[in-house]
Image (cartoon, rainbow, N blue to C red):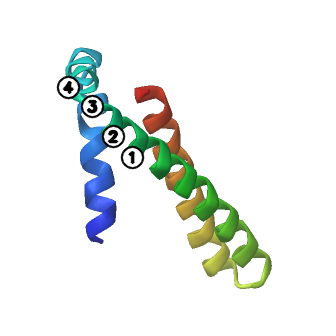
């Protein structure tokens, strides 16, 4: 999806090297940093919703997909928090 690719773009410098991430973080302004914080908050809300929806089904395939989404969302949030 489009938003997923935008979020992945934010994490690419962090995955490449710490030096690259420092360069990116030095060039961010306060609004951009605030936007990253908002993304982290939305990621937490999304994880909570995923966990709720998981309780509504007994289908193992669906719960596995929800678990994968939750793990990816949690990892993304952790990477973003580490950038700050």
Marks 4 and 3 in Cβ contact (< 8 Å): no
Vertical arrangement, residue 44 with respect to residue 22, above or below: below
Cα–Cα gap, marks 3 and 2: 6 Å
What residue is at 33 percent from the left and 40 percent from the top? 31
Task: Answer with mark 3 or mark 1, whichever residue precedes in sequence.
Answer: 3
Q: Residue 57: horizontal and vertical position, in percent?
A: 75, 85
- Which residue matches tag 1? 35
Q: Secondary structure at mark 4?
A: helix
**Location of residue 67 (image quadrant):** bottom right
Q: Position of residue 78 (x, y in %)?
A: 52, 37
What is the secondary structure assignment of the residue under circle 3?
A: loop
3D distance between C-alphas at marks 4 and 2: 12 Å
Precedes in sequence: disc 4 or disc 1: 4
Return the residue at label 4: 27
What residue did someone put label 2 on? Answer: 31
In the figure, residue 29 lies in which quadrant? top left
Q: In terms of secondary structure, where does tag 1 sit?
A: helix
């Amino acid at each position: 999806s489009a938003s997923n690719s935008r979020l992945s773009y934010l994490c690419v410098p962090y995955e490449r090297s710490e030096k690259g991430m420092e360069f990116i973080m030095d060039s961010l302004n306060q609004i951009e940093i605030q936007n990253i914080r908002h993304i982290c908050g939305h990621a937490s809300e999304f994880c909570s919703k995923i966990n709720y929806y998981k309780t509504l089904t007994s289908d193992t395939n669906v719960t596995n997909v929800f678990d994968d989404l939750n793990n990816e969302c949690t990892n993304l949030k952790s990477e973003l928090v580490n950038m700050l």
